[in-house]
Amino acid sequence: MSEQVTPSFTSALSETPLARRAVLRTLAGTLLLSVTPVGLAAAAASVIAVRVWPANAYTRVTIESNAPLSFKQFSLKDPERLVVDLEGVDLNSELQSLAGKVGDNDPYIKLLRAGRNKPGVVRLVLDLKAEVKPQIFTLDPVAEYKNRLVIDLYPAVQTDELLAFLNDNGQLKTDPNPPAFNKPDKSASQASKAGETKTAEAKPADNKASQGEKTRANDSVDRDKLKVDRLITVVLDPGHGGEDPGAVGPSGTHEKTVVLQIAKRLRELLQNEPNFRVVMTRDADFFVPLGVRVKKARAVQADLFVSIHADAFTRPDANGSSVFALSEGGASSSAARWLAQTQNDADLIGGVKIKSGAEDLRRTLLDLTTTATINDSLKLGKVMLGELGGINRLHKPNVEQASFAVLKAPDIPSVLVETAFISNPEEEKKLIDEDYQQKMAQALFRGIKRYFAKNPPLSRTKLAQQ
């Protein structure tokens, strides 16, 4: 067929100017049809939002678009730079705004520039303050977010002791003498070494409430015979953070913000006690995956894990405080099941690069969870409810249970506290009120002290040798 078409095309070009113009118009139309799909594909994605989340742990840059983005990356030395080419996107005002979103206090980014490298390709250049280990990945649409490209910048040399410990102990083995994160002041440490500190409000010699206390199923020693001569480690877990705002109140208050404020107030109260040390899963506005929160608690051999949240529901009149523990079986109510599912979706919303075997790890942690640990969690939850009822209405009078991923440390009593319904206009006002935040922190503080008064932690003298 080509032998028939080519002569006719050639001969047509040798005809009159009018004939030649007709042929050229046909040729132009054919070429347009052949290149238009490629051109449209290259310009199909449009960036609709950009965000930068600086933190000491890592800095995250998020590029949100209405269609998936493909990318290429490479690093440059002297000075340190990371280059990311976004393919199939045009430079727009959102991308140009990236430069203004990097503050002087960003631990890792000195300057961020976006420019048109070639048609359909935008180049991001990140001038770095130090060598980093970048992780770049894409996320599918979820919740309110569309397609996202995530650039996580981790320091090449981790300065955070706890994160460095986790990186060096990827298999989550239990170190009998983990590093002393958040060391207490010298006087508290000396008192602990001397055996002078006691469990909060607990005097083993005359504490009647501790007599006859049942031991854990795998313990061979009675709790009431223990002499508490070590620090008690409490891990506070402010929910959500960074890309994951959590629930949003009617006036725009973010759950991640108020629970961090409450957690910091609770940390201050606990740190003023001579025999407590506190580790927080996050102390700023950045995202921490659920599994990492659990790993942090286990790495420091926590005696207690308290996850702090602010509830939300479809009805704005829902109100009250709640406490949840892990369930080995089904949820205690449909509402508890729904809440656990929404909280477990935090990894999808916050943005986690899923690795193979992650689901197996979650299943293993649940399988390892002992009934004794859950029973201790229920005891903690009960005293927490008793204190919360003094400052707010209780949504449910009993501790509820469901399969919360963040509570799946197999050897640490863990509870999730819903301080109030941020979706309720009146309770949202409470949650942003400093006086109410302090009252909430004090209630949780009293609950923790009451729990340890009746349930002294097991002896672990190496932990006190700091």
Image: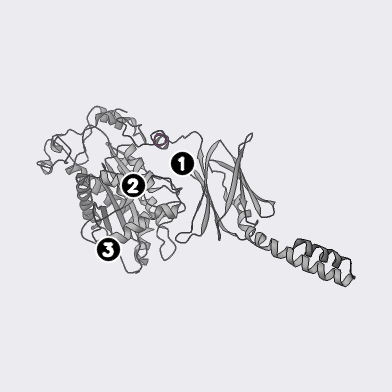
Q: Nearer the viewer, residue 220 or 88?
A: 88
Q: Which residues are magenta?
A: 164-168
The residue that disc 3 covers is 334
- Res 452 visible: yes
Main SS of the magenta part reads helix
What quarter of the picture does the C terminus occupy? Answer: top left
Q: Alpha-carbon distance for marks 1 and 2?
A: 23 Å
Q: Of 441 and 26, which appears nearest the observer?
A: 26
Per the image, the residue denoted by label 1 is 57
> How many marks on residues?
3
Residue that label 2 marks? 362
Q: Residue at x 27, y 28 (%)?
A: 462
As helix, strand or loop, the secondary structure at mark 1 comes to loop
Decide: is 459 above or below 416: above
**Residue kind at label 1, given as amino acid type:** Ala
The spot of residue 148 in percent (x, y) is: 52, 55
- Where residue 426 sits, quadrant-wise, is bottom left
Counting from the top left corner in percent of width and height, residue 45 is at: 60, 59
Query: Does the magenta run of residues contain 394?
Result: no
**Which quadrant would the N terminus be assigned to in this image?**
bottom right
First of labels 2, 3 by sequence position: 3
Is 154 drawn above or below residue 19 in the view shown?
above
Please give the name of the residue rendered at 67% of the width and 51% of the height, measured from the top-left corner.
115
Q: Nearer the viewer, mark 1 or mark 3?
A: 3
Secondary structure type for disc 3: helix
Q: What residue sits 16% from the left and 34% below the top?
A: 226
Query: Which class describes the residues within 10 Å of circle 3: few (<14), some (14-19), or many (20+)?
Result: few
Looking at the rendered image, the disc whose residue lies closer to the viewer, 2 or 3, is: 2
The 10 Å Cα crowd at callout 1, few under 14, some 14 to 19, many 20 or more, is: many
Place residue 210 in its image quadrant: top left
**Among the two numbered marks 1 and 2 on one chain, the one whose residue lies closer to the N terminus:** 1
Q: Position of residue 15 (x, y in %)?
A: 89, 69
